[in-house]
Every structure is written in structure tokens, then in C-alpha cells.
Amino acid sequence: MQDLEAISADVVDAALRLNRDLGPGLLESVCETVLAEMLARRGYAVARQRPVDIEYDGMRLECAFRIDLLVEDCSLVEIKSVERLNAAHAKQLLTYLRLTRQPLGLLINFGGETLKEGHRRIASDYTPFAPSRESRIGNRTMFDLQGKTALVTGASGGIGSAIAKALAERGARLAVSGSNGEKLESFRLELGGDHVALQCDLSDGAAVDQLVPRGVEALGGLDILVNNAGVTRDNLAMRMKDEEWDQVIRVNLEAAFRLCRAAMRPMMKARGGRIITITSVVGATGNPGQANYAASKAGLVGMSKALAQEVASRGITVNCVAPGFIASAMTEALPEAQRDALLGRIPAGRLGEGDDVAAAVVYLASDEAAYVTGQTLHVNGGMAML
């Protein structure tokens, strides 16, 4: 195990370097991010933090926090004193440390005159927040979702059923959702296992707000949210009715936002999660007669990027998968000339399959995608190289 005094000095040195090099006035979140990166380069990973009572020159520093750092064998240690700093520097340093969620607990207290050995407590039962790369890959199959729980909307047909099957095959326990209760229950039975079916009309805001809590109650938690459900109401813009615009935005964009907002709560408490939203190549390229659909899908991409920035520090990733033309009953019914014209736009020379999209979702849901967030994976056979 690393020398504990050396560890404490290393972390303090990183924070003091920030204090010296960056100075006051920077956004708190920027300081926290930079310090987390510095600690990561030094071999630490931050798991959690909680308030502690610290006094400096007889004044209580309310911004003092305890942080947990993972080091080699995951032991927990407390260091009670570090060198004396002025109050302004102490507050800055504590702010830098506040959200650097990594593993070893290190309790930094401003008030001592020298760097002391202080009080140490080692507990061998500490469980780290983030597994190492070795534990994620070396000791098990990649893309393993055993023990994970997932909610998939629009799960009973097409792309949604392929996604649900792929997640279940990798070990996840599912709550599958859709608007057609009979079809949904039939699909749940097809999946087998102890998955659950949760009927929901995504055009009903109140019902949408209850879907994630229902899923959490049924599954005992929520690790993965897949926003797959969507509708189309195609029309040329000059002819598009307000209700055609409103319904597509309500189901495709607003419902997805409501579900993300609800899912972030249990994921933040668990210090981790995956939010994956199915968009479309149309959101990036546009398509005549689909102004409403294109707007909803482009909106999902922008929303996901914003959410990714908000929750990244909590171990939650937010990404999109944008399918191109996927084989369906509708594409099978196209006249041969139209089908050939469609295939001519795709360098891969074929339509996509639901499994192509599902594979991207499984990757983003797995530990192997822990460092991928705010991104869109384009699954379109090369028809739009974005």
C-alpha cells in the first residue's frame, strides 16, 4: 500500500498548485474539474464527499468537505491536519476538493501549524465508487450488464424490441414500456425472465412523470434509461397543422426530457447511470415533409449534450444513437425502383437492422463507455458521415 502521509501530501500539493496557478475568481465547477483531472493523473479516483466540521482561527469553515480517494487496495484513511494557510486559501482549497469524487478517505482540516501525522483510521471494508479498468474488462466479459436495471420506451416493436432483447441478453433486468398494453405484455412474455411491462401513453405528461418512479419501484432501482419511443406526423410545412407539430414535439422531445429529469434522481443517488436516446439521421440532415420530426430529433441531441454536462461529475453519461434507414415492413413494401434508389444513398449497400442500433445502445450502456458522454453514434451505413 502507498505511504499514507505521501498520499495526503500528494493531494494537498495538487490543490495548492491549483490555488497558485489558477488563483481566485474562476468558476467553482472549473476548479473542481481541473483538480479531478490532476488527481486522476496522479493515480487517484474520487468516490464521494460529505460535510465535516472544520475551524480555522476560531472561525467555522462551512465549505469544508471530506472526500474519499481510491488507492490500490481501497483502504480508508483520515488525515486530520495540513499546513496552515490563510482563510481565503483554505476556502479555495476546500472548494476545489468538494466535488472531486474519488477513493482512501482523506479528511483535510485547516488549523494546524505544520503538516502532522494526525489521526489515522484504516478500514478495510471500503467499497469504491468506480471500478478500475482491470475490474471492468480483465475479470469479466466486455459489455456485461449483469445486475443492471433498464427502462426502455417504445420497446414492443421494431428498433425498441431489438434494443430490449440485446440488453436482456447481456444480463440487464428490464422494464419495457409502450402504449399498447396487450402487445407489450406479449413481448414481455417473449423476453422471458423476470422483466416487467409498464404501459404508458407518452403524450400524457402526468403518466410520463410516473413512468420512471414505477420502473424504480418494480426493478428496485434504475441504471439505464433508453428513450426510444417516437411518432411521426408527416406533412409539408405549408400544410402542417398545429396539432401535428405539437404531438410530435410532445412525444418525441418533451416526454424524453421528462423521463431524463426523473431518471437523474435515482442515478445521482447511486452515483452512476446511463441515459441513451434514440434520435435519427433526419435530425442532422433534415427531410422534406418532416420539419416537426427533424426538429424533435435535433432537439434531443442538444438536450442530451446539455444534460451530459450537468451530470457527468455524478458518474452519469448521456448519449444518443442516430439510426439511418432501418429495415421495416414499410421499407419491404417499397417498389423495387424506390428501394434501389434508397440503397443507392447508402455506401454500405444495405438497410440497417434493429440489431445494428441495439449494438450501439449496449455499448453505451456498458462500463466500457464510461468515458463517452454528450456524443451521438451515427448508425447509418455511411449515408451521412457526420
Image (spheres, helix red, strand yellow):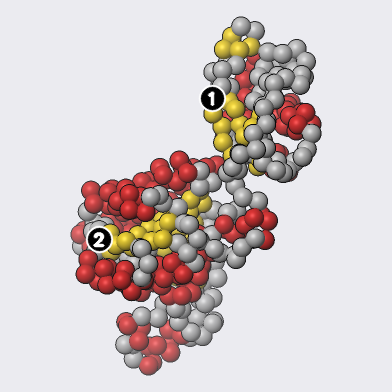
Q: Position of residue 219 (x, y in %)?
A: 37, 54
Q: Is residue 87 visible?
A: yes
Labelled pair 2, 1 in contact (Cβ < 8 Å):
no
Q: What's the mark number on residue 244?
A: none
Q: Is residue 276 left or right of residue 37?
A: left
Q: Amino acid at mark 1?
A: Pro
Q: Is disc 2 surrounded by few (<14), some (14 to 19) or many (20+) residues within 10 Å?
A: many
Q: Quick check: 86 above or below 6?
A: above
Q: Position of residue 155 (x, y in %)?
A: 34, 67
| Residue placed furthest toward the bottom | 336
The amino acid sitting under disc 2 is: Gln
Residue that appears at 67% across and 37% down: 75
Graded by Cα atoms within 10 Å as few (under 14), some (14 to 19) or many (20 or more), the crowding at tag 1 reads few
The N terminus, quarter of image: top right
Q: Residue 160 vs residue 89: left or right?
A: left
- Residue 23, visible in the rendered structure: no
Determine whether 113 is above or below 370 in the image: above
> Is residue 66 shown left or right of residue 267?
right
Q: Which residue lies under the disc numbered 2?
A: 199
Q: Is residue 304 above or below residue 348?
A: above
In three-dimensional space, the C-alpha distance between marks 2 and 1, rounded to whole angstroms, equals: 42 Å
**Position of 273 relative to 342 (above/below):** above
Q: Residue at x 50, y 60 (%)?
A: 146
Towards the viewer: 231 or 289: 231
Residue to which mark 1 is pinned: 51
Measured from the top left, where is residue 294 in percent x and y? 37, 63
